[in-house]
Image: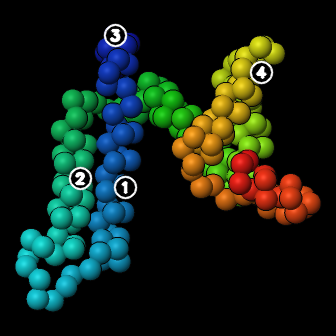
Amino acid sequence: MSEEIEEEQAGRKAGQIVFAVAFVLISLLLVVMLPDQTVWKNRTKFFAQPRFWPAVGVIGMLVFGGLHLWMRPRHRSRRYLNRYDLREAGVWLASLEYALWFLVYVWLVPIIGYLPATLIFAPLLSWRLGYHSRKMLWISVLFGVAVVVMFKGFLDVKIPGGLIYEYLPDALRSFFILNF
């Protein structure tokens, strides 16, 4: 394949083989899981079956994902993966880092509390995003306080208190559980 064709493929088409293969594999996994995740009820109309519409959607995903994989514009190419595909897949995988940050945050909130977790993660994520100045870190701390005040105070969102609050004196513990 010539260098010019590779450069042309680096645009909107980069990563399509990785996407198509991943989509077909995930769809196949969902089709295999259908019998365990849905039920077929006796004396229920065909189109009202709990398994029917999920099966239509998941089988449709598999069929159309397979067609996309088969009919993609480069399917005649000898090289199936090139550096642009791998670079694009790397960008997709890099976004999973933020999902991991969120999972750690959600895991820590019941342990250390909503306010402390937010006040730790807001500056950490700001730092991770490249905001290294003291001003930006303090803005992220103020943002964290504003989020906690808005959710707990104004919106009255019920978020369980952290386990760490159990070590506080009685009056202070109930205040922290209710407000932070």
Mark nearer the viewer, 4 or 3: 4
Residue reaching furthest bottom? 42
Q: Distance between the residues labelled 1 and 3?
A: 33 Å
User: Which mark is nearer the camera, 1 or 3?
Assistant: 1
Tag 1 residue: 26
Between the C-alphas of marks 3 and 2, the distance is 33 Å
- Left or right: residue 166 compared with residue 150: right
Residue at x 25% of width, y 30% of height = 74
From the image, tell me which residue sits under label 4.
138
The colour scheme of the drawn protein is rainbow
Q: Earlier in the sequence, mark 1 or mark 4?
A: 1
Looking at the picture, which amino acid does disc 1 mark?
Ile
**Residue 21: image location, x then y, percent:** 35, 46
Compared with 5, 92 (above or below) is below
**Residue extending furthest toward the front:** 171
First reached walking from the N terminus: tag 3 or tag 2: 3
Q: Which residue is drawn at 18% across and 64% down?
A: 53
Residue topped by disc 2: 61
Where does the image place residue 64, in percent across and percent down from the top left? 19, 48
Residue 4's label in the rendered image is 3
* Quarter of the figure that contains the N terminus: top left
Question: Which of the two residues, 157 or 116, is positioned nearer the viewer here?
Answer: 157
> Residue 128: in sight, yes or no?
no
Label 2 Cα neighbours within 10 Å, binned few <14 / some 14-19 / many ≥20 = some
Q: Do the residues labelled 1 and 2 touch (CB within 8 Å)?
A: yes
Q: Is the residue marked by circle 1 packed among few (<14), some (14-19), or many (20+) residues within 10 Å? A: some
| Pointers 2 and 4 in contact (C-beta within 8 Å) | no
Residue 161 seen in this snapshot? yes
